[in-house]
Amino acid sequence: MPENKFYDYLIVGQGLAGSLLAWRLINHGKSVLVLDDGHASASSMVAAGVINPLAGKRFNHAPQIHDWLEYVETTYTQLAQQAKEPFLQWVDMLRLFHTPEQQRFYARLPGQEAIGNLLGGSFPPNQPPQPVQAPLGGFTQHRTGFVRLPALLHFLARWLREHQALHITTVNHEALEISTERVCYGGFQAGGVVFCDGYRSMHSPWFGYLPFAPDQGEILTLAQKPGIDAGQLPDKIINGAQWLLPIDNGMFRLGSTHNHNIQNHQPAREGTEKLLQGMSALLNSPQLLQLVRSEAGVRPATSDRQPFLGTHPSQPRAHIFNGFGAHGSLMIPWYSEQMCRWLIDHQPLPETADIARHGNEVA
Ligand SMILES: Cc1cc2nc3c(=O)[nH]c(=O)nc-3n(C[C@H](O)[C@H](O)[C@H](O)COP(=O)(O)OP(=O)(O)OC[C@H]3O[C@@H](n4cnc5c(N)ncnc54)[C@H](O)[C@@H]3O)c2cc1C
């Protein structure tokens, strides 16, 4: 990597946020160097990549949902064409009510014009169109699916290397100098630095003042036992008290737990047991799946559940693109475009995401 080159931006982190931001900036003609520690704490490498525009137990949607979905389609499709391998897979989702309250939340939905195309029909208790247990009934959702995140990040790492734009290192904050003229790190110089370092930004001297709410989660990978009839297991995403995602070749992901009190990447036996118990309440034939592996990661979540985009209040060369919580696959394609416009053209950021909402507190 040429050390005497002056980059437009250093980006810390090659998770989904840093990767898509770097890809867009390079496509806009900017010179970028991504510094990543080999995905040591990448929640993007653990995530199932599920896209669900009506997430949450009340089935609420964000006002920008159609913009987000349009960018999901165009961004991952363009990347798939470049890579000649598919990353995005649309799959309908069966939403199973797990409290009577949810039946009332659902009753409000069909009248809402903005989300009409996201809803399939409902089904009565115990009559789901998939081999699952649905004692309270549920409904079908469209425009749901998943992104094959590890394959996408491996492709983008290769693409960045081809552009001499990826360097594997652990960034030590104390060795990163940000002055009024430039940013320097280990011989690399740049006009600015963008932190896309996931939940570890909460320990940053520049952005540690932001209200991060890291959310550790466990997730399982399961395989269908050999020789069984595939019709005995779902081929749609099943979302009840927890969710089951059919991926390729008889493999499934089952998720996920939430824990705001720990920040490690070690799956614990209790988490695995909790998920397997939940699966028994979800499927008609849970014994047809066997555990392949358990994984854990930390979601870079925020206290107001909105992302962190913007520039440090007193250090104009330090920027952040982070805080995508449990919904990075859905949100990062659109927000990475907004962040590019902010960095390159100073176009205003969406107010709900701009870190200016948290004032000028400096750590
Ligand atoms: C169990 C689980 C399930 C999930 N399921 C889904 C899902 O189904 N759908 C969905 O959309 N989202 C899901 N998520 C959330 C998703 O992972 C995030 O929204 C998204 O991937 C965050 O991407 P990021 O790039 O901001 O952070 P990360 O992916 O965490 O990337 C940060 C990168 O920076 C690197 N880094 C950090 N500090 C340094 C440093 N000092 N020096 C060098 N490198 C550094 C890290 O190693 C990592 O590579 C899930 C998360 C978990 C944990």
Image (spheres, helix red, strand yellow):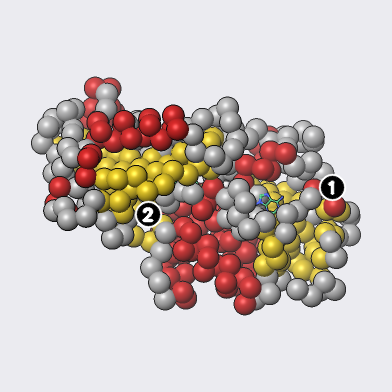
**Residue 36 sits in quarter:** bottom right
Is residue 312 shown left or right of residue 99? right
Q: Looking at the image, which is closer to me, 304 or 277?
A: 277
Disc 2 crowd rating (10 Å Cα; few below 14, some 14-19, many 20+) is many
Rounded to the nearest angstrom, the CA distance separating label 1 from label 2 is 38 Å
Residue at x-position 31% and y-position 30%: 277
Query: What is the quadrant of the C terminus in the image?
Result: top right
Is residue 130 shown left or right of residue 114? left
Q: Residue 322, can we see it?
A: no
- Mark 1 or mark 2, earlier in chain: 2
Q: Looking at the image, which is closer to me, 201 or 282?
A: 282
Q: Looking at the image, which is closer to me, 330 or 338?
A: 330
Image disc number at residue 174: 1
Q: Residue furthest front?
A: 226
Q: Residue 85, can we see it?
A: yes
Image position of 199 with respect to 280: above or below: below
The kind of residue on which mark 2 rests is: Phe
- Asked if ligand 1 lies within 8 A of label 2, the reply is yes
**Residue 358 sits in quarter:** top right
- How far from the left and from the top, in percent, is residue 317? 79, 54
- How far from the left and from the top, in percent, is residue 293? 41, 47
- How far from the left and from the top, in percent, is residue 279? 29, 36
Image position of 280 with respect to 335: above or below: above
Residue at x-position 72% and y-position 59%: 169
Q: Which residue is mark 2?
A: 146
